[in-house]
């Protein structure tokens, strides 16, 4: 089973003509509400792909019995949830303009309870956006761990990042997050990459870079008619981790991640167009050919 730690959230997705910038305003052309939260998106992606998944998260009193709760039960996600009294489930407000640029504002709500929670010892865990101190404790206790800082990177201290990087097997980030981590740690990208057994850096339309054993492997993005980029990275991680758990080589895991990501961006909403394993494989074969042999 794959465990995922982090936010379960409600996504408010807005469309605007152009992000207005400081001291300016704009008008909203569309506003929809979807299920979200980085960890929950990854857990849903893993579950739809057919792998068992445990989601460790904090939710508000508004969550039990909600449509989101029922959706997770339908997916058979194991909910390891703390329900926080007098709190709302975390909420993300995501603004996307016609050029595809985004700004996100995140209300932590019930997720603030992570800082007081007991960290479990896990065999195979992905730490998504969550309380930094909680993720530090999870990393220290877990047997195999991957990590992506996401929009919560600004909440980490250099010391917390150093502890996590010393205790993980895979680091996921985008280009901006990688550069920001280097600044925070006062190190170069090459040195940071060398400090972790495996790093995966996503680069949007330019694909992703897998770094391991001193070698770089470029995996192209899967070209589709993209509607909304929200959740693309979460879909990538769901595809990668599911393939890894099933024994595929890391490069093939990156390709699986790229394929799942391509499904996510074809529809608005981070969990509205997740593929099952067979549907993912059909597109994988069209783009990359037959995946390599299972190695474990």
Image (cartoon, rainbow, N blue to C red):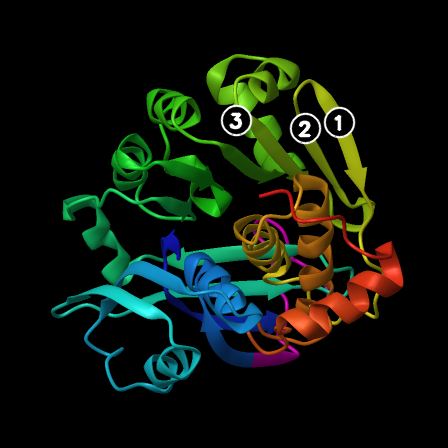
Q: Nearer the viewer, mark 2 or mark 3?
A: 2
Residue for badge 3: 181
Residue 27 colored magenta? yes
For the residue labelled by badge 3, is the local secondary structure a helix, a strand or a loop?
helix
Q: Nearer the viewer, residue 169 or 37?
A: 169
| Residue 68 % position (x, y) | 38, 80
Few, some or many residues within 10 Å of mark 1 (<14, 14–19, 20+):
few
> Which residues are the magenta region?
18-31
Q: Quadrant of residue 223?
A: bottom right
- Horizontal side of 126 relative to 226 (left or right) equals left
- Horizontal side of 15 relative to 88 (left or right) equals right
In the displayed structure, would residue 191 be above or below residue 43?
above
In the displayed structure, would residue 14 be above or below residue 119?
below
Mark 2 touches mark 1? (CB < 8 Å) = yes
Number of the label disc, if any, that sits on residue 216: 1
* Marks 3/1: CA–CA distance: 19 Å
């Amino acid at each position: 089973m794959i465990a995922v730690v982090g936010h379960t959230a409600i996504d408010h997705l807005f469309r605007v003509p152009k992000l207005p910038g400081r001291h300016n305003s704009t008008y909203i052309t569309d506003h929809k509400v979807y299920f979200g939260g980085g960890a929950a998106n990854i857990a849903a992606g893993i579950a739809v792909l057919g792998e068992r998944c445990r989601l460790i998260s904090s939710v508000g009193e508004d969550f039990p019995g909600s449509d989101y709760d029922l959706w997770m039960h339908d997916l058979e996600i194991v909910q390891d949830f703390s329900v926080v009294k007098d709190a709302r489930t975390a909420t993300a407000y995501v603004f996307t303009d016609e050029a595809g640029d985004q700004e996100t504002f995140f209300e932590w709500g019930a997720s603030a309870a992570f800082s007081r929670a007991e960290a479990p010892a896990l065999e195979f865990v992905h730490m998504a956006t969550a309380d930094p101190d909680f993720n530090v404790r999870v990393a220290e206790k877990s047997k195999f761990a991957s990590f992506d800082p996401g929009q919560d990177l600004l909440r980490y201290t250099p010391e917390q990042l150093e502890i996590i990087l010393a205790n993980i097997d895979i680091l996921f980030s985008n280009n901006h997050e990688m550069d920001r981590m280097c600044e925070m740690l006062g190190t170069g990208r090459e040195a940071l990459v060398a400090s972790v057994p495996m790093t995966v850096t996503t680069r949007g339309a330019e694909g992703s870079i897998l770094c391991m054993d001193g070698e770089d492997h470029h995996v192209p993005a899967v070209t589709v008619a993209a509607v909304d980029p929200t959740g693309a990275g979460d879909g990538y991680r769901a595809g990668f981790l599911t393939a890894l758990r099933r024994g595929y080589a890391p490069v093939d895991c990156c390709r699986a991640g790229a394929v799942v990501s391509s499904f996510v961006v074809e529809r608005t909403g981070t969990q509205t167009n997740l593929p099952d394993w067979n549907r993912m494989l059909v597109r994988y074969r069209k783009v990359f050919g037959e995946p390599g042999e299972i190695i474990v």
